[in-house]
Amino acid sequence: MNSKAAPDQTSPPLIAEPTSPTRQAWLMFRGNLSAMAGLVILLLILFVAILGPSLYPVSPTEMVWMPLTPPGASEYWLGTDYIGRDILAGLINGGRVTIAIGLAAASITFVIGVTIGALAGFYGGWVDNLLMRVTEFFQVLPNLLFAMIVVMLFSASLTNVAIAIGIVSWTATARLTRAEFMRIREMEYVKAERAIGARNRRLIWSVILPNAAPPLVVVSALSTGSAILFEAGLSFLGLSDPNAMSWGRMIGDNRPYILDSWWGVTFPGVAIFLTVLAICLVGDGLNDAFNPKLRQR
Amino acid sequence: MFYENLRSSLIRVAVASAVAFSGLVTVANAEPVRGGTLKTFTSGYRTLNPAVQSGAATGAPGSQIFAGLIQVEDNYEIQPYLAKSWEISSDQLSVTFHLVSGAKFHDGQPITSEDVAFSLEAVKANHPFGAAMFGNVESVETPDPETAVFRMSKPVPGLLLSLEPLLMPILPKHVYGDGQELKTHPRNSENVVGSGPFKVEENNPAERLTLVRNDDFFIPDRPYLDKITFAVVKDPLTRVLMMEKGDLDYAAFSGIRPNDATRLEKVTGLTVTTEGYGALGYVHYLEMNLRNKPFSDHKVREALARAIDTGFLAKVIFGGRTEPGTGPLHTGNPFYTADVTRHEPDLDTAAALLDEAGYPLGADGTRFGFTLDVPSWAPAAHGPMAEYIQATLAKLGIKVELRKAPDFGTWVKRISSFDYEATMNGSFNYPDPVIGVHRHFDCENIRNVIWANTEGYCNKDVDAMLSAAATETDLEKRKGLYADIQKTVAEDLVFIYMPQDFSATVYRDDVGNPPSTPFGALAPWTDVYLKTQ
Amino acid sequence: MAFPGLLRAAIVRRACNVLLLLLAVLVLNFSLIHLAPGDPVEALVGEMGGATPELIAQLRVQYGLDQPFIVQLMVYLGNVVQGDLGVSTYYNRPVTALVLERIGPTLLLVTSSLFSAIVLGTLLGVFSAQRRRSPLSHLVTVLSLAGFSAPVFWLGIMLILMFSVAIPILPISGMSSGDSSQGIWLYCLDVGQHLVLPALTLALIYLAFYSRLSRTSMIDVLDADYVRTARAKGLSQRQVIYKHALRNAILPVVTFAGLQFGQVLSGAVLVETVFAWPGLGTLAYESILRRDAPTLLGILFFSAMIVIAMNVFTDIVYRLVDPRIKAR
């Protein structure tokens, strides 16, 4: 795609200018149309989630109009749900909850996954063996089912939902981190650090981890997307905080009424879809940007 | 609007097929005919034995499998069933039942008075209302195989009503009398031997329950139907579509919502009726724990009653198809009175009451907060009610935190151990108030049992009236007692009554004699038939 | 034909590993469910419509809930070793029977959707890898992103809206409609019709995943040295693709199919709930609503076994497909 050289590029840079890897990645990313589209959508969604409630001050819990009013038939553009609540207000306020849980769960996923993966990959031997057994254990259990049980047992508060998602989703992150650590630990510069007497703690967190960061950033972006889908699934099943509106809960609540209201389930679904899609596009873009070799794919 | 267009074409198709159907109906016999399979559904049942399980899921098939001593017809008229006749002693302390001769269980064993005596003890000990219904029945004497004499310590005015198969199914003593615990007896769901018009052919709780005609049934030429299939359909939406497509002949306790009713009423060839629920009387209410602040204060309860606009709720949740409840009795109950204190919705009065009660508006805009439990068993009603209450009380400065237990047990535990502040709740009246109503108000029934007197209400006057009403055999006097009870309970604001439930039955016009007595679908379907075979 | 010593040791180690894993699944889940607040007897009593304290105590004894936790755990493990997973507190029937009844429908749903997703996905991936800038290739990219981003239950509802409500050509839910007396072929046809939408829902999600995965690995393989060598030797494109490249490109697909099986079961919980499919997923969901601990434990145990079996199975497939492992 870059073969069509920009007109102002008068002379091919024979000696590449020394740019930082981050800057290089950003340049790469900026040139990626779909990734930029994803970024714009994502920023837009975040903007609405953060500022929306003050720009559109309709309460998502108030019964404001006749139940099951179709979109465009009242001042509530996207229609109302089965008890006359404004769907648009639900979308705006629900986005906050959905995204917040997604981020929180992804952070938990990241912390557990990276810690376990780093320790297993760095130390190898019995530590690796033990931690991989633990990982296997979590891989063997159907994660949604396990999360459902955890939420059932310990009540469906927002915190519990985020924790439940976090503790069942970290295995992929752990495996990736482990692989990266095993690869990097054999690199010359790590050996050099070790030779000058660097402690394990420093080797793990300050030497290897930064070098393993690019794929981890990508995988965390994707796990935020998964966590949002996961939260939606739990809410759909009714395992969510009844005091907080979320997109998944809107789909679950409106589902019994789909014969009379396609809008009640469609709009929140589209919102989830767009958010996760945007995150995926950004994640893909980051992946390409960090691995220019893979660009052609 | 692609969807709307397609919808209307779908309706056209439905109308066309319905017209084709009605053509057939006109040719059909007006006289009941034998044969055919009635397709209905069940939302899933735990057991098939109504002696150990209350509710419609077990009751609908259970009342087909097991017979009772009597049947209840329209206007609560009591008709012979397994008992062909009975005499009541002048002191009202004994009733002698004469059983139909030659009646047999499904395995060919004769039904005798021994089985009646056994069933009564079984229900008394195991049914959730066993003690309420038959606590005053001291013994059942069996002078001969076809005679059973009930001896009571006090008159039991609701006795005959309670001998309906739903509440007292006649069980085979030779099956259940083997010493095993009845509540968890394996034969409650496997290899069930009943006494009623239909026998179990296949019981697969995941998919389908099939009942076939009992050819040896003690009423000659009944039942009309050859077979009944209960498809296990837990999803209400699926049920609506199945009804629309004609995949279900008959659907009671369908959990359809008012908007579904509106939809189905438009389908030619289908009838939507709210008949057949009179004996149950499903009442929804907000239950507050009266032991603790703030709900121990009558003013606070009155403030809530004035804040919650149940008329509005009836319109929004039930499409205006039900009435707001006014007291413990359902408006369809023969003992119901409308003459009770009602609190017109008025937020200003409510605020003033809260000020008086010592809950002024704080600097943060709140007066106080409480946790409102929302059970999982009536989501279409309790969810919206709780959400409305949360939104409305927020305007008064009361912060309501909803707590939804995903599983039934957790909610039961919280309420029955009195470990709650307020909860959405609801219960059935059942035909006699002694069964479904007394339990909520009797001081002695403050027990750690769900749907007992869990709110902790105790009023000696009400207690006296309740025990008088339980044994009063004069109908008018009894009505007067219940009217007074309703007035006092409404005055005391024991519960805040929500709109009454919307219960509807849908059936194809091809179904003859759809069950519409007070017990409706929970009565025997001996007379039901299919017009076209 | 004796196993070589090394292989036998590997098999023994593997078997120990599996047993340990299953033990961990049992112990951890049992502890989790039994140490958490709440009590299955309360749920049961609620289902009955209420009960006296005496009865509650009696039921507790009957289900062994009056014993200390460690005793309960040991009794449970002992029973499991003898093949007894306990009795469902709700249905009052053996858990093993309940689970076995439901496992068939779930396996039917999962394998049919997974199989079609893998076959179709691999083909799509392979074709698009050969023409990286073709419309097909872009379609695969778009499809894979869309498939990943759409909530599976929502996709199911949308399909219902389209094919059961707007254009009512497929059943909305359940696994069969008529009675079973209609003959085996009609019954199969009936089940087949009911299977279309739920299987399609699950398959779409995994089609997205596998087409992308096989596309990526195919590109990797096509760029690898040995494929270039094969090309240089003058082998035709078709020979290169199917003899050398495809084999290697399938490996990651196989690995993931095994690794991901747990997730596939999770997806099945949602899809089964949406379509009221009478499988393990609906049983699990219902058991959660009833707090039916023995059944939940049984389901977790069985699904762990299914996942492990799938892993072993994919291991074998892997060995069959991968020439390098075979050579060893």
Image (cartoon, grey):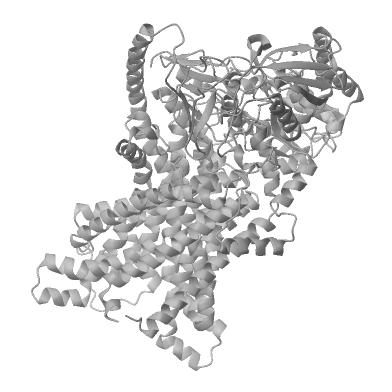
Residue A269 visible in the displayed image? yes
| In front of the other: B366 or C22 | C22
Q: Residue B261: horizontal and vertical position, in percent? A: 50, 20
Name the residue located 42 percent from the left edge and 55 percent from the top edge. Answer: C264
Q: Residue B116: horizontal and vertical position, in percent? A: 70, 26
Name the residue located 63 percent from the left edge and 49 percent from the top edge. Answer: A157
Compared to C99, does B206 lie above or below? above
Residue C137 shown left or right of residue A67 in the figure: left
Number of callouts in the render? Answer: 0
| In front of the other: C65 or C160 | C65
User: Which quarter of the figure is the C terminus of chain B placed in?
Assistant: top left
Name the residue located 9 percent from the left edge and 72 percent from the top edge. Answer: C235
Q: In which quarter of the image is residue B103?
A: top right
| In front of the other: C55 or C251 | C55
Residue C159 shown left or right of residue A191 in the figure: left
| In front of the other: C309 or B88 | B88
Compared to B297, does C138 lie above or below? below
Name the residue located 70 percent from the left edge and 21 percent from the top edge. Answer: B163
User: Which quarter of the figure is the N terminus of chain B placed in?
Assistant: top left
Q: Residue C243: horizontal and vertical position, in percent? A: 17, 69
